[in-house]
Amino acid sequence: MSLLVATLIPGVILLLVGLPLLAANAGMIAALKSMPRSQTATWLFFGTGSAWFLYNIWHLSPADFGDYHLPLFVVFAFIAALAFRCVPDFLAVRGLAILMLLAAMPLLMAGYMNFDHPQVYFQKALVYVGIVLAIWLGAQPWRMRDFLQWLFARTERTRLVGGVLAAYGILLTVVAFTY
């Protein structure tokens, strides 16, 4: 992945989330409020995260237990299937955490050992914050529900967070074209 794309993707995602929050879009607010326990979000986020993880397991090198990729694939596929049945609460939040952790590697590797462009640290800082949040929310997914309740309790908070996300998204989008 090129550095331009690795910086542009988070910028666009922040804009897509931040602008509706800044405008206090009722549809976006309703979707975000229902997301932690939504079946559709669960299938989308956890399903995609599980598929991506299983793809990585299937393509392990011999140095990374690649000789045992079939048993590992079967065990982790079984665990993912059981998660849908046995722990459906907040599985969408855990799916988002999985996606963030899996996406972090290609996003960070795009700027690895690239000292010619110090503006890459805007992207890297965001990815590291995302990693910390993914680990925290993966372990305590109900915190996402609590945060969303706090966020939407007052319109000013929603607009402030939306403005910050949109502004950082604009910054990353502009920075992406400076490499």
Image: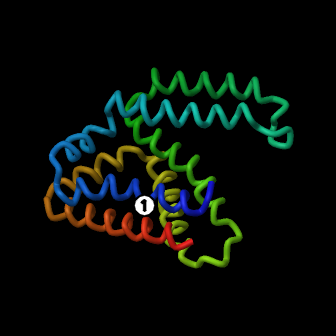
| Type of amino acid under label 1 | Gly
The answer to which image quadrant residue 85 occupies is: top left
Q: Residue at x 51, y 66 (%)?
A: 123
Number of disc labels: 1
Residue 9 lies, with reference to residue 57, above or below; the image says below
Along the viewing direction, whichever of 105 and 153 lies nearer the viewer: 105
Secondary structure found at label 1: helix
Mark 1 sits on what residue?
A: 11
Q: Position of residue 138 (x, y in %)?
A: 48, 46
Q: Residue at x 61, y 58 (%)?
A: 2
Q: Dot 1: within a 10 Å radius of its alpha carbon, few (fewer than 14), some, or many (20 or more) residues?
A: many
Residue 52 image point, x, y percent = 59, 36
> Could you say which quadrant of the image residue 42 lies in?
top left
Give the residue drawn at x 19%, y 53%: 152
Q: Is residue 122 left or right of residue 16?
A: right
Quadrant in which the C terminus appears: bottom right
Instruction: Give percent across and percent down for residue 170.
Output: 37, 67
Observer-nearest of 36 and 43: 43
Whether residue 80 sits left or right of residue 63 in the image: it is left
